[in-house]
Image: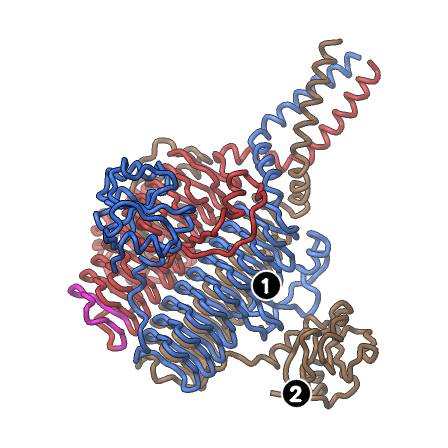
Chain colours: A brown, B red, C blue
Amino acid sequence: MAYTIEQIATALGAKAFGAVDLEIDGLAEPADATARDLALAMKPEYAANLSQGKARAAMVWSDADWQSLGLDAAIVSPRPRYAMSGLTTMMDPGQGWGDGIHPSAVIDNTAELGPGVAVGPLAVICAGAKVGAGTIVGPQCFVGTNAQIGTMGFLREGVRIGARVMIGERFIAQPGSVVGGDGFSYVTPEKSSVEQARQTLGDTGDTQSQSWTRIHSLGAVRIGDDVELGSNCTIDRGTIRDTRIGNGTKIDNLVMVGHNVEIGNDSLLCGCVGIAGSTRIGNNVVLGGQTGVSDNIFIGDNVITGGGTIVLSNIPAGRVMLGYPAMKMDSTMEVFKGLRRLKRLFTDVAELKKTVSKNDASD
Amino acid sequence: MAYTIEQIATALGAKAFGAVDLEIDGLAEPADATARDLALAMKPEYAANLSQGKARAAMVWSDADWQSLGLDAAIVSPRPRYAMSGLTTMMDPGQGWGDGIHPSAVIDNTAELGPGVAVGPLAVICAGAKVGAGTIVGPQCFVGTNAQIGTMGFLREGVRIGARVMIGERFIAQPGSVVGGDGFSYVTPEKSSVEQARQTLGDTGDTQSQSWTRIHSLGAVRIGDDVELGSNCTIDRGTIRDTRIGNGTKIDNLVMVGHNVEIGNDSLLCGCVGIAGSTRIGNNVVLGGQTGVSDNIFIGDNVITGGGTIVLSNIPAGRVMLGYPAMKMDSTMEVFKGLRRLKRLFTDVAELKKTVSKNDASD
Amino acid sequence: MAYTIEQIATALGAKAFGAVDLEIDGLAEPADATARDLALAMKPEYAANLSQGKARAAMVWSDADWQSLGLDAAIVSPRPRYAMSGLTTMMDPGQGWGDGIHPSAVIDNTAELGPGVAVGPLAVICAGAKVGAGTIVGPQCFVGTNAQIGTMGFLREGVRIGARVMIGERFIAQPGSVVGGDGFSYVTPEKSSVEQARQTLGDTGDTQSQSWTRIHSLGAVRIGDDVELGSNCTIDRGTIRDTRIGNGTKIDNLVMVGHNVEIGNDSLLCGCVGIAGSTRIGNNVVLGGQTGVSDNIFIGDNVITGGGTIVLSNIPAGRVMLGYPAMKMDSTMEVFKGLRRLKRLFTDVAELKKTVSKNDASD
């Protein structure tokens, strides 16, 4: 679908300059742009590549001299990174499916589908499930018994929603994600070596080897509005109460959220993050890629962790953390610096010992 | 389904007190309980929330004064955590599917399904596969050629079992798990840089860049009885022999078990654990979340690792380990303490050097 | 299918000795071998187990005295590990499916399937998709709108290929992998705490809590020839340009490749590796299991990382790296050694301080 430069600028609340009637079919990086693309030249270093492409129009930074860049038209936005959201929404060609109920889908008679719900081929919707108006249930998806999904959602292919899971409005899930698998909760007849080691910080004492018995997960998962989920994630049901994810929280690929976990609003969980059971995560928290969080702890609002951080204890609100174990980022940076000089430190101390013992001897 | 307090206590081998005819429909945390829930008030701090809910009955700790908690009835179990297993089994509402063979399932004529086997919608069961009596193959599951699954198993939606995989009794798998993907095994025509770097601990010498050729995985996966598997796990087939998982071992979400790996009985692998090829893990081992284990090593019986542990070499039986690299937990705790004081240590040594060199000079 | 020792040796370019007409049905480790297996006794320590099995023939090392091992026939290859590739290809019994188009598959009229394409039960192929000659699309797979897959590919059960993804020849993907999920890309109306913390290395200043708005992923994924993908991987689409994976690159289970990432040729990504958005990885790179790589960085050709390495900044070509943070492997080995002696170092420095201050006092 084509838009004029003027239409795009208006939609973004941005300013249009030059040949504002120019039609645009898509977005492109400057070097790859055709004459019908809007080039994304939001910084001078990006704009330098415009000459390698054929763009006649570009999104440029605030005080750019767009004419000297050889453009016929330009769009200027006060925060171009934010404008990318509106731009990519307008230009998204989508997945090319998503209308109507495919005849190969298996939908229980008692499931309730709102107006405009689409169900892809070979999807399964179980008894008592409710899917809100305008939601697209993709090909090969699964919606369990009595599960609820709000309006205007979009489930990509093969998403699986377990029984009794409740999801708010505008939910988006990428392929292969699982919401509502059982929690990982087992118990031994007598106190286990793990219980013992936790109490003693490492000593398993005389605990005996035992087999594990399953604690079933009776809780569900409760997800707020505007939540998004990456590919192949797993969000477990709670044991008794529900696992909860607040409004506006976005979760990347291959993230695991354990049973009973509570996550607040507007948090970001980057790829491969793992959160163990019963941990609580606040609002506006950002967990960097591969961050691991122990069970039964608390991470306060606005906490940020860097990539690979291993969180073994509570983090108060507002902290920026990094490392294994997680420490304040500046402390971990100091540790990283120290590790690089550690060999030298050992040498220094060895030399000091020699000197001092010699001095001692010569006293 | 409703049970009386007496029925529940009898089933758990626990003691019932008070109005033992009271009917219970479900379990709840104390603050959330309705009058027909059994509240789980197994510790005084949980019981403190009973007044926020409407529970008339609760599971309480051994010497609890249940009447003073405002309850009409109570169940007392010697190990309440263990009683949770029986309780949640009784009260589990299940997934709401699992009877009969759905007409949309694609089942090869030569597959053998035992009595009472259920197959969900859009599942596929291939030629020569055998599914034991009472096992439920969930919606959209896949059971490969000549694969065998024992009796009384439960495969949640979208579980995939590859060709020739052999699984014992009472197997439970959460959605999206894959058993029997091919191993990650490639070889170069000449010695590769990785082989060289492993021998020299870091020096790739004059090895040349080469392309990788595939070694096919001819082995299968052999899984014992009472094994459980989380969501979106991957258990690879062996190269020549089978990958093996012993009886009673439980595996959490997003765990990877590489080709040829052997895992003993009654071990626990927590979320996001990765075990590289040909490694052997003993019995009653517990690997904490995100633990990574190198290939071709050995972890002895009863070993426990804390979250995020990276295991690069063998671990003798009985050790409790933590850290990167894995060390005994108390050693790693010392290291963590040392890291927090590392900057101070550098300062101390710098000052010492100054003092000592001054003393030296003044000698 | 049976082969004679001579046929096998010829196919491998290896030498056959003894009863070269002996027929072989399969491969086995020495202790497990039947009389119709070729035992894999490529090292003396493997050959030691021949007596526990019934092998009449074995693959042996270059100067092995095969007759004294009790064998009737032997195959000798100059690089036996490499011969495993040819051997396992010949002997692979496969998955037991893969002929013809299953009637339960849902294939759009406008999809183009080359000669000899097979489509498994309950697979979905969308409008405009092109599947090259001889490619097998497994059971319950998904091929999105206008996606292209080259010739002679093999998609195991439940692989999902999103819209417009382009894949070269001989692609192999294990069950549950996802190519073409949306990237994890969000933006806040004003500068976010993460943008601020990155600039200041840890100080979020006075940034306000905000909600995240989605940047859509308009790019696709472009994958070269001879690429292989493990189980339950996720390869995200690019934001504007395509995410790219070069020829001959092999990717293990549960690996995440973020949006806009570029990976060169003949690289290996081991299990549970995560690569954040817009990072570039060179040719012949090997990333060990659970390696994590930050966004927007660069890893040069021939780099190798050990298991669990966390890469937070660029790595020049040819480096062998380990640790958190990633350092050259020998440096990290020194650090590991230092950590084990860290407690002792603190003690030494404490004693030095005492001695020196005493000396000072006694001056």
Residue A48 horizontal side relative to residue C235, left or right: right
**Quadrant assignment for the N terminus of chain C:** bottom left
- Identify the secondary structure beneath mark 2: strand
The subunit carrying tag 2 is A
Q: How many marks?
A: 2
Relative depth, front residue between A226 and B135: B135
Residue B304, picture quadrant:
top left
Image position, residue C363 (x, y; %) = 80, 12
Task: Please state which amino acid type lies under the numbered disc 1.
Answer: Val
Label 2: how many Cα within 10 Å (few below 14, some 14–19, many 20+) = some
Residue B92 horizontal side relative to residue A18, left or right: left
Q: Is residue B117 magenta?
A: yes
Does label 2 lie on the same chain as label 1?
no
Residue A66, picture quadrant:
bottom right
Image position, residue B237 (x, y; %) = 34, 54
Relative depth, front residue between C19 and C57: C19
Kindly report the distance in space between the C-alpha atoms of the residues bearing marks 1 and 2: 29 Å
Q: Is residue A336 above or below residue C355?
A: below
**Which region is colored magenta?**
B104-120
Q: Which residue is mark 2?
A: A3
